[in-house]
Image (cartoon, rainbow, N blue to C red):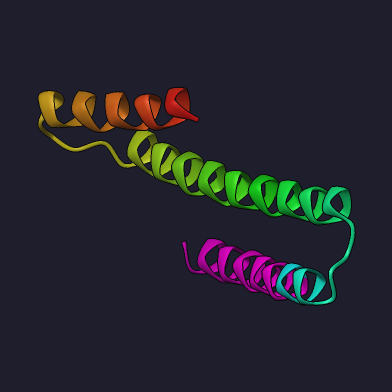
Amino acid sequence: MATCDKNILNRLKRTEGQIRGIQKMIEDEKECVDVITQLSAVRSSIDRVMGIIVAENLKNCLENPTTNATIQQQKIDQAIQMIIKK
């Protein structure tokens, strides 16, 4: 999971940079459509990070099941609900 964490942090840092760029665009009174395009890119980036986190947790859950079948099923159901909400 350490590699995944590093990848996630890198993605979030890029997203942070995008948000700063959007703030600058607004300060510079750039066209609305350009700002919205960048905001859409940020949303996609965040959605991707969320998907990676859920997928990694689900993968870990399946590869390292708990001995309690009920808890295992709850973890799987929770991951599925997070995917569906997206």
Q: Position of residue 45 (x, y in %)?
A: 67, 52
Dominant secondary-structure state across the stretch colored magenta = helix
Work out whether 35 lies above or below 48.
below
Residue 37 lies within the magenta run: no
- Depth check, front residue: 56 or 16: 16
Q: Residue at x 50, y 30 (%)?
A: 86
Q: Position of residue 23 (x, y in %)?
A: 71, 72
Q: Is residue 44 left or right of residue 34?
A: left
Using the rendered view, name the quadrant where residue 35 is placed: bottom right
- The image shows a total of numbered marks equal to 0
Q: Residue at x 77, y 49 (%)?
A: 36
Q: Position of residue 50 (x, y in %)?
A: 51, 46
Work out whether 39 lies above or below 10.
above
Give the residue furthest to the front. Answer: 29
Q: Position of residue 20 (x, y in %)?
A: 70, 76
- Depth check, front residue: 81 or 16: 16
Q: Residue at x 83, y 52 (%)?
A: 32
Using the rendered view, name the quadrant where residue 51 is placed: top right
Work out whether 31 lies above or below 29.
above
Residue 6 lies within the magenta run: yes
Q: Residue at x 86, y 48 (%)?
A: 33
- Depth check, front residue: 69 or 46: 46
Q: Which residues are magenta?
A: 1-21
Q: Is residue 51 left or right of residue 69?
A: right
